[in-house]
Image (cartoon, helix red, strand yellow):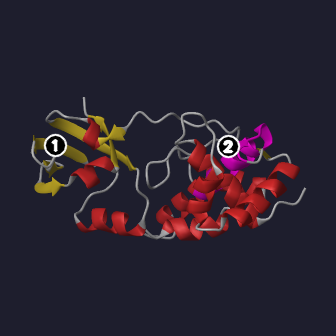
Amino acid sequence: MIISFTEENYIKAIYSLASKSATQDVSTNEISNYFNNKAASVTDMLIRLADKKLINYQKYKGVTLSAKGQKLAIKIVRKHRLWEVFLLEKLNFKWDEVHDIAEQLEHIHSDELIDRLDKFLGEPKFDPHGDPIPNSNGQINSIKAKPLVTFTKKGNYILMGVCEHSKEFLQHLTLIGLKIGDVIKVEDINSFDNLYKVKINNKHTLFFSSKVASNILVESKK
């Protein structure tokens, strides 16, 4: 069965939106907003995906991925994240540059190529943004890291990933000298505006807004 790039993008989008839903259901409006498309166009695509047994869809009800669609979505995510690692580590792209290129490369259909790429990279567990990379069997490591804003106590935390993947946000983190693996020591949290006073790697002091603290994933440093 031939699946177009657009269909693959829809499957990945449904997978992403479902991961943020308690019920795993995704509404037509959510998909429409995600792609900034008209609801009628989205409905037409959902009917096509349902015909290919990739989603479970009934008009006016939420959409869920079928087992077949879930398997495809995870495979696309695996390819995307492996390509991001390759672009960063082997071609020296910046972490705010790899996403758009990986969006194109994720549609390559050769499983052998992706398995060789995985082996060539040393079978990485996480991509440059801290997102887990599914293995060849579709298994995904669970993420223990939480947004910094959920921690209300002073202490040392390790930056494990980011929630926000926009180029603007990643460039902001680069500008202030923050990267995956850095130790963030929270020295003070302002009770009025939740401004975080932190020290990075026990060297330079920064101030994080609550927006930044909400979009960086950390683990408590033991």
Residue 19 or 218: which is nearer the viewer? 19
The x and y percentages for residue 129 are 43, 54
At label 2, the amino acid type is Gly
Place of residue 7 in the rendered image (x, y in percent of width and height, measured from the top left): 75, 60
Indicate the quadrant containing the N terminus: top left, top right, bottom left or bottom right: bottom right
Q: Position of residue 137 (x, y in %)?
A: 71, 37
In the rendered structure, the answer to whether residue 90 lies left or right of residue 58 reads left
Of the pair 41 and 75, the residue shown nearer to us:
41
Between the residue at mark 1 and the residue at mark 2, the CA separation in whole angstroms equals 43 Å
Q: Is residue 153 left or right of residue 18?
A: left
Q: Quadrant of the C terminus?
A: top left
Residue 189 screen position, x and y as percent: 12, 43
Q: Does 21 sit left or right of 173 as displayed? A: right
As drawn, the residue found furthest toward the front would be 60
Residue positioned most to the top: 222
Decide which of 32, 134 is in the foreground and name it: 32
Residue at left offset 23%, top offset 50%: 210
Magenta span: helix, strand or loop, mainly?
helix
| Position of 103 relative to 12 (above/below) | below
* Residue 61 part of the magenta-drawn span: yes
The residue indicated by pointer 2 is: 62
Q: Is residue 98 above or below residue 212?
A: below
Name the residue carrying label 1: 185
Residue 107 visible in rendering: no
Name the element at disc 1.
strand
Boundaries of the magenta span = 60-80
Residue 140 appears in the rendering: yes
